[in-house]
Amino acid sequence: MSWRTGVYNRGEHLLPMAISASQRLGPYRVLAPLGAGGMGEVWRARDERLGREVAVKVLPDEVSSDASRLKRFEKEARAASALNHPNVVTIYDIGSVNSVSWIAMERVEGRTLRELLFAGPMPTKRLLSIAAQIADGLATAHQAGIVHRDLKPENVMVTKESRVKILDFGLAKLTKRDAESEPSSRLPTEAGTSPGVVLGTVGYMSPEQAAGEAMDFPSDQFSFGSILYEMATGKRAFQKATAVDTLSAILHEEPRPVGEINPEAPGPLRWIVERCLAKDPESRYASTKDLARELATLRDRLSEAPLQTASLARRKRRRKLGWVAAAALVLGLAALFAAGYFGRTPVAPRSVRFEIATPPDLVSDDMPRISPDGKYLALNASDSSGKSQIWLRSLNALSAQPLAGTEGAGRPFWSPDSRFLAFFAGDTLKKVSISGGPPRKICDFRLGADGSWSPEGVILFDASQSPIQRVSAEGGTPVAAVKADASRNERQVGWPEFLPDGRHFLYYAFAGNRGENTYRIGSLDSNETRPLMPAGSLVAYAPPGYLLFVREKTLVAQRFDPKALKTIGEPAPLADQIVTSVSGGVKMSFAYTRFSVSREGTLAYRTGEVAGSRLVWRDRSGKEIEAIPDSVDVSNPALSPRGDRLAFSGELGFNAASIWIRDLARGVNSRLTSGTPGESCPVWSPDGSRVVYHIIGRQDFYEKSAAGDEEPRLLLKAAEGADITFAGDWSRDGRYIVYSQRSAETDQDIWILPTFGDRKPIPFLRTSFKEFKPVFSPDGHYVAYESNESGRSEIYVRTFPGQEGKWRVSSEGGGTPQWRADGKELFYLGPGEEKLMAVEISIREGFLSGTPKPLFAARVSDGKTRNKYVPSADGQRFLLETAMPEPTKPTTIVLNWPADLPR
């Protein structure tokens, strides 16, 4: 077979040409056709500027006419053009003229590897020479983050000088429909190919590509292994009667061993082929550079061997001696390879760090959660309209995609097999497959938060000051798994984290101001728990035996024995300035820190400071009118009855949160309380002379003059075994304070504290459901509150002091009710706290409520504070606690993070 000029002609039927000779494409004058294929027409052309001949590929109309695909093609082509390697065809230019899109590249004279394979298996020496060059080109591209995705003999060129050139690097994905936009069962086809015929592309797919899964550089290694197999045996590794059967073989069958077909193939070569063709991507090479190095080593040592296989062929009359020599050669090569591979000085593993930016149109201060297999990031974020949902990004993709059905989702957590995400939306725990489909309900639970999912299908989740709950991932009724132990001064438990055995788990015990917060070890098989270490942040377990946590904004790793359930040695630092949450103006003694780690050695974290929240006035359309100066990291705003003063909780430069009062006319802040840690949730007396507030941790109410001229007075001490959540409101006649209280028997209930007589608290609403955030109507005859009795959080109104009437006001979920001063309107936050809602109220002839109407996207800050907004007296303005505007911080990804630990 003679050498050709224009190796791009691959023996296929030429497609009708969209251009003609002598036509100009930018600076290139078209000379003659070279060939055509499924990826477009190729022409020989002359660069009039530099006086050289090039190859110009004209893209198919289906690409040129599709703006989005063309844009992606150009982006991929630019990335591929950055490759500068002797074994990769160089891309010179891309352009478009009169709706004809083209790409100019290096012109190569030679033959395709497919043409060379027509002669059968290659001699080992030439095979290794070509294979080492292919692997070297692949390794360089992979190091640059570029995956070929369509490696096959047709895409490998060999020049007269035996120089290898890889074609179409990184272009296959974008000149065909993206895998994400097609059903995974759809097979690739090329022009001129009959249905059911085995295609070259199908025969070289990796199992993950055949299964429609995400692909990375190990996929190219598998395709390369298929090429190596064919070079060594003259047969395809996977070849069946139909494309479907071939795909099935790739997924489930092993090819015949190379040694059975070609006994003269060196053992080390067979081992390399077998490793490349491993079904599990993790069983292939951790780095394509290692693959290239092994092939180059084998090539060089074969050429140095004293006895060449060619000389054996010339000694046929001495066959016995020849076989002995051949065996000695194979054994020698195997020994040399083993000495080089197994006996070489170990190269210390290295970590790789890079950043992933959150798309500019998304806002989130949440931490992306890395999947257990290290392939995906899941992030809860809001778009420009204020709609929040879970976004999913593969680490080998350029963009994130929203997961349908996850609107209003809270912080997601992964299933152990990385196939599902669990999340709370409203009052329901759900799970959703990352491959698509509607979410499925697991259970109902109000104020559920972050969780952990065991390999045995058990989910533990944080229940916001309630016991840690346990439920089957297949659905069911949650039951308490761990409760706070009053004998240890524990006020709250949460943040469970399963350990490797799937039975033991870590959790934190919060003691507030009464003791030390600790991490403890619990078990699904016992009520007994044991202390592990002080708790300062979230803790995550990572194989092969580490606990990761944050200490003074430094992410550290500490050795941990999962069998003995104890820590070993001292923590080692991994990263500095880890983002730590600020909630409600109080720096949390238990820090919600931004990091996540997978089981296979990938770490994700964010650095910097959380901007916190600020107070902003908005009108009924949501337009910002003004921001309250000096309102950074404050919470729980409360307007005085006359609207001239604002009470709130925050630090304002001090080390502990206090209650502050701001004179809105003069813009002056005055500190009301002494700064005992946890002072929060102020409520005004009806005449504006006094303020009631709550101290988190003590669970007690205190009262103080708004003038600040007296010491605070204990108004109500929490009963034994009960937690006062916060004061909700003070009736306009000054006679009653309504508040919510949590107990082990009935969870959240609503109570009334009289301000006269014996001041003995009176239960107002005690049920098996959760009722909280109560507020009096202006006339004092009704109480609006939030309850989950319907299965999700809704707004209800009851008569007061009796309970003759009860009405549901919200229609599709809601929380945090607030009355207009004249009682003619009731406001609340809609599902997921995404929108501020308004309902007209009439009480002339009994209680009547209108249809809820959305006012605007609320965009209130995260955190479980009592008040996130307060209306003006006339209901025309709203003061909202909103997140500070800032660019969402990028996420740092560390591959092989244990390599950063001291040895």
Image (spheres, grey):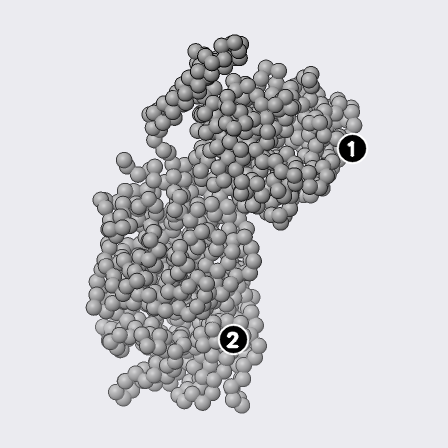
- Which residue sits at x=39%, y=78%? 768
Q: Secondary structure at mark 2?
A: loop
Is residue 657 visible from the viewing direction of this image?
no
Q: Which mark is residue 234?
A: none
User: Compared with residue 573, is residue 456 higher up or lower down, i.e. above or below?
Assistant: below
Q: Earlier in the sequence, mark 2 or mark 1?
A: 1
User: Compared with residue 560, is residue 656 higher up or lower down, i.e. above or below?
Assistant: below
Label 2 crowding class (10 Å Cα cut-off): few <14, some 14-19, many 20+? Answer: many
Residue type beneath disc 2: Ser
Q: Secondary structure at mark 1?
A: loop
Is residue 645 visible from the viewing direction of this image?
yes
Side (left or right) of 396 relative to 101: left
User: Compared with residue 442, is residue 24 higher up or lower down, i.e. above or below?
Assistant: above
Query: Where residue 601 sits in the image (x, y, percent)?
Result: 38, 42
Side (left or right) of 678 relative to 412: left
User: Which is more toward the observer, 149 or 276?
Assistant: 276
Nearer the camera: disc 2 or disc 1: 1
Q: Which mark is residue 16?
A: 1
Query: Where residue 613 sits in the image (x, y, percent)?
Result: 41, 59
- Which residue sits at x=57%, y=72%? 853
Residue type beneath disc 1: Pro
Query: What residue does disc 2 label?
Result: 810
Query: Where residue 796 sits in the image (x, y, percent)?
Result: 47, 79
- Which residue sits at x=57%, y=19%? 163
